[in-house]
Amino acid sequence: MDLSSQSSNKNMVTDLIKRAQRGDAKPFEVLVNMYQNRVFGLCVKLTGNRDDAEDLAQEVFIKAYHALDGFRLEADFGTWLHRIAVNMYLNMKKKNSRVIQVSLDEPISTGDGEVSREIADQDAAGNPLASLEEVEFRGMVRQALDQLSQEHRSVLVLRDMEGYSYDEIATLTQCSLGTVKSRINRARQALRELISPELGVGIQNPESRIQKK
């Protein structure tokens, strides 16, 4: 997206927010449609399953609607929604742990985005074991993430999967920069310790394989 398109999009979002702040519900519905995929994507990564993610995403937009009067127009609306999502996730009562399984219907993440299983299977026809090993590895990462505390999981997701900077994470989580860095380091170390026994080898940086490119 070029600079003119970005400016036009921001102006449109600002106009929608202003109208919604005046009590018009229609513009907020447009905002929900614009940002629901981004919010839901973060919620999936935080909760580890679609059912809880759908519940959390719905609560995020309800919270955002009621808190819209306090939104500062110079702020980024998507980042503001992410902050609400993270705070609500951290405040949730921990539910019964669930085993996260990799769905064969879900697309495979690659360095260039996501591709369907059918396309991936065609591309990996010469080496199906390599594709299977990657899926299994990602399944182990997801299960390991589920064993981290909510505080450590959230900062790791924001840093290594959403691509936020340390400073941005500190703002999102309302923690000091030192606390954020410490939690991310501890989360990465815990991830290594959880995954290495499964593979029988030492993994130096498993988070690098789940990073947002």
Image: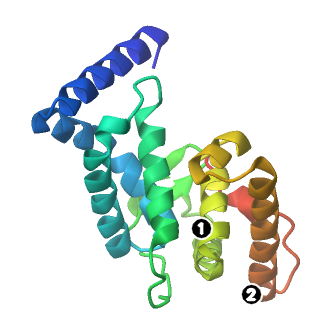
Residue at 45% across, 74% down: 92
Q: Which one is in front, 109 or 120? A: 109
Q: Amino acid at mark 1?
A: Ser
Neighbor class of circle 2 (other Cα within 10 Å; few <14, some 14-19, many 20+) is: few
Residue 21 left/right relative to 77: left
Which residue was labeled with disc 1?
A: 131
Look at the image and tell me in which quarter the C terminus lies: top right
Mark linked to residue 198? 2
Q: Quadrant of residue 25?
A: top left
Residue at 36% across, 37% down: 70
Look at the image and tell me in which quarter the N terminus lies: top left
**Residue 122 in view:** no
Residue 47 left/right relative to 9: right
**Residue 125 in view:** yes
Question: Could you say whether the residue bearing mark 1 is in a helix, strand or loop?
Answer: helix
Residue 213 left/right relative to 9: right
Q: Which one is in front, 195 or 130? A: 195
In the image as oriented, which residue stretches furthest toward the front?
70
Residue 86 place in picture, x, y as percent: 50, 58
Alpha-carbon distance for marks 1 and 2?
18 Å
Residue at 33% across, 16% down: 11
Mark before the other along the chain sequence, 1 or 2: 1
Q: Is residue 198 above or below residue 61?
A: below
Q: Which one is in front, 173 or 103? A: 173
Residue 52 left/right relative to 159: left
